[in-house]
Amino acid sequence: MAEASGPRQSKNKANGQETFIRFATMQRMEHWVLMITFIVLAVTGLAQKFYTGGIAEWIVLRLGGIVNTRLIHRIFAGIFTFSVVFHLSYVLYGVFTKRSRPSMLPTVKDFRDVVQDIRYSFGLVKKPPQFGRFDYRQKFEYWGILFGGFIIILSGLVLWFPTVATSFLPGQFVPAAKEFHGNEATLAVIVIVIWHLYDVMFRPGIFPADTTIFTGKISKHRIIEEHPLEYSDISGKTSETPLEK
């Protein structure tokens, strides 16, 4: 998961190319956990939601039946829930204890960037918006994952413990939770496949893949091109500084 407040980048020489540290070790580990749990939950969850499909039946059988499929789903649901709680605690600790800058918070500039980006795409302005540490698309995806995660976790708990839930909630909450859980999970998979995978794998300039979240490093060329305001903040140079050859 992209971090909501990050350490200031530091320069690092690698293979003769100047790079910047973009993600700390803890943030990269969080992404690994999220990526693995998301894949397992998507496979086991969608196999249960669309159980009449041939592929779903094949997956359930390969996992040892519906009981094993549900068990695996619940184990990784617990890991996912813990990772979300850990992430929020990690962010809040950084903000209130280390005074880290919450760079994932939406600002007025983000809304202006959306308008300018649309105008630039239609050729109405000559320059695209200048982004800092995270652009509006990355913030949108981050908060979408966070809010979607809460919906999935809460509805999943109702489905996991229906007797406990209905002891203080109307019984209609159980079928409602089932719809919320399945539809939100399906939406999350669609967004990841269509939006996220394109942005980190097939987008021009980074194909075949953006490895920053795995290595923690971003090249000087990319940070100037994609995050010029952040580069200005780090280097003290303006975002119009030409790339060194």
Image (tube, rainbow, N blue to C red):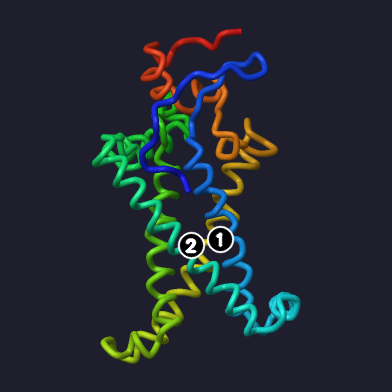
- Between 103 and 188, which is closer to the camera in this rendering? 103
> What residue is shown with label 2?
80
Q: Residue at x 42, y 36 (%)?
A: 135
Q: Element under label 2? A: helix
Residue 191, relative to residue 185: is it above or below? Answer: above
Q: Are marks 2 and 1 in contact (CB under 8 Å)?
A: yes
Residue 173 horizontal side relative to residue 137, left or right: left
Where residue 96 appears, as percent x and y from the top left, is 24, 41
Q: Residue at x 30, y 45 (%)?
A: 93
Quadrant in which residue 236 is drawn: top left
- Between 74 and 59, which is closer to the camera in this rendering? 74
Residue 190 horizontal side relative to residue 228, left or right: right
Where residue 161 appears, as percent x and y from the top left, is 41, 84
Amino acid found under the numbered disc labelled 2: Phe
Lower sequence index among marks 2 and 1? 1
Amino acid found under the numbered disc labelled 1: Phe
Q: Residue at x 35, y 87 (%)?
A: 164
Where residue 203 appears, as percent x and y from the top left, is 61, 38
Q: Element under label 1? A: helix
Image quarter where the C terminus lies is top right
Q: How many marks?
A: 2
Where residue 19 appears, as percent x and y from the top left, is 56, 21
Q: Which mark is residue 38?
A: 1
Q: Give the label, 2 or 1, closer to the camera.
A: 2
